[in-house]
Image (cartoon, rainbow, N blue to C red):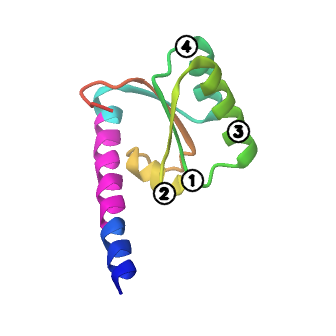
Amino acid sequence: FISCERHHGGHEEVEESSENINARLALVMKSGKAALGVKSTLKTIRQGKAKLILLANNCPPLRKSEIEYYAMLSKTGVYYYTGSNIEFGIACGKYFRVGVLAITDAGDSDI
């Protein structure tokens, strides 16, 4: 009974943090600059412009490891978005799926 209660409390925390990241992401998309997709993300990483990289949870493993490797070389942070690429696309304010996003300018957001 106690473990179930703890689990429920943890779930609310996760839900709140995902809403928080969605709000911050919306602010970045509105006021900042971001590169959507693998090609443009790798391009911004190579140029050294990427501040943070976000990956959807269903990003293919090979693509994920390639981006993680580039990020490690450029000392860029990687954030793993909890939702799928469909939810990630909606959070970005787009009507298509987004698997990878590189933030180059955070704008008004504190991301």
Please name the residue shown 35% across and 66% down the image: 10
| Circle number at residue 83 | 2
CA separation in Å, label 2 and label 3? 18 Å
Under mark 3, the amino acid is Ser
Image coordinates of residue 109 in percent, x first then y, are 27, 31
| Circle number at residue 48 | 4
CA separation in Å, label 4 and label 2? 27 Å
Q: Can residue 80 be seen in the rendering of this structure?
A: yes
Marks 2,1: beta carbons within 8 A: yes
Image coordinates of residue 71 in percent, x first then y, are 60, 26
Magenta residue span: 12-27
Classify mark 2: helix, strand or loop.
loop
Residue at numbered disc 3: 65
Residue at numbered disc 1: 57
**Residue farthest top in this picture:** 47
Q: Is residue 111 above or below residue 96?
A: above
Going from N to C along the chain, the mark reached first, 4 or 1, is 4
Please name the residue shown 62% across and 25% down the image: 72
| Circle number at residue 80 | none
CA separation in Å, label 4 and label 3? 18 Å
Going from N to C along the chain, the mark reached first, 2 or 3, is 3
Mark 2 residue crowding within 10 angstroms, few (<14) / some (14–19) / many (20+) = some
